[in-house]
Amino acid sequence: MLNSAYDRLPRWDRLLWIMARLRSPDGCPWDREQTHLSIRENLEEECGELLEAIDAASDTMMREELGDVLLQVVFHSRIAEEENRFTIDDVLDGLCDKLIRRHPHVFGGQKAESTEEALRFWKDAKAKEGYSGETP
């Protein structure tokens, strides 16, 4: 199907390579013309299908729908990278930093003896960042 260099890439790099190729001048015309707004509904639809898979307790459906949601994240990140706004690495760095920041009982000096305490740490950290909300 593809060349052996592709086959030797780690899975994550394969996905990024595929998306870059789809958006390239010799890629797919449909993929190339998409924007954040034009694929916005796709993200909403895929999230809904993932929720249905979770409700159905279907590992097969969940695996597929998680892939579809991940595709949307990679697609939006690729568009942003092409516009010199941010990259998928920026998204990943931000997520890792947030998870560490919001779990001081795991990555810092605080201790959480219960789920309630862990959620309090999460909410406190989120509030310091200017957000509100109940759960991670």
Image (cartoon, rainbow, N blue to C red):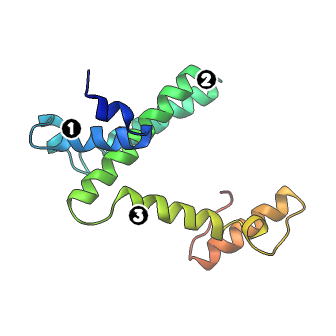
Between label 3 and label 2, give the one nearer the viewer. 3
**Callout 1: helix, strand or loop?**
helix
Answer whether labels 3 and 2 touch (C-beta < 8 Å): no
Secondary structure beneath dot 3 equals: helix
Sequence-wise first label, 3 or 1: 1
First reached walking from the N terminus: tag 2 or tag 1: 1
The crowd level at tag 3 (other Cα within 10 Å; few <14, some 14-19, many 20+) is few
Q: Residues within 10 Å of mark 1 (few under 14, many from 20)?
A: some
Q: Identify residue for label 2.
A: 59
Q: Taking 61 as reference, is 83 above or below it?
A: below
Residue lying at 30% horizontally and 35% vertically, measured from the top left: 5
Could you say whether the residue bearing mark 2 is in a helix, strand or loop? helix
Q: CA distance from mark 3 to mark 1?
A: 21 Å
Percent position (x, y) of residue 65? Answer: 48, 30
Mark in front: 2 vs 1: 1
In the displayed structure, 10 sits above or below 1; it is below
The three-letter code of the residue at mark 3 reads Asp
Q: Residue at x 35, y 30 (%)?
A: 7
Residue 71 in the figure: left or right of residue 31: right
- What x and y, as percent, mark residue 53? 56, 26
Between disc 3 and disc 2, whose residue precedes? 2
Q: Are marks 3 and 1 in contact (CB under 8 Å)?
A: no
Q: Where is mark 3, residue-wise?
A: 90
> Quadrant where the C terminus lies?
bottom right
Residue to which mark 1 is pinned:
22
Task: Compute the Cα span from label 3 to label 2.
Answer: 30 Å
Q: Residue sitting at 53 percent across and 23 percent down?
A: 61
Question: Which quadrant does the N terminus fall into?
Answer: top left
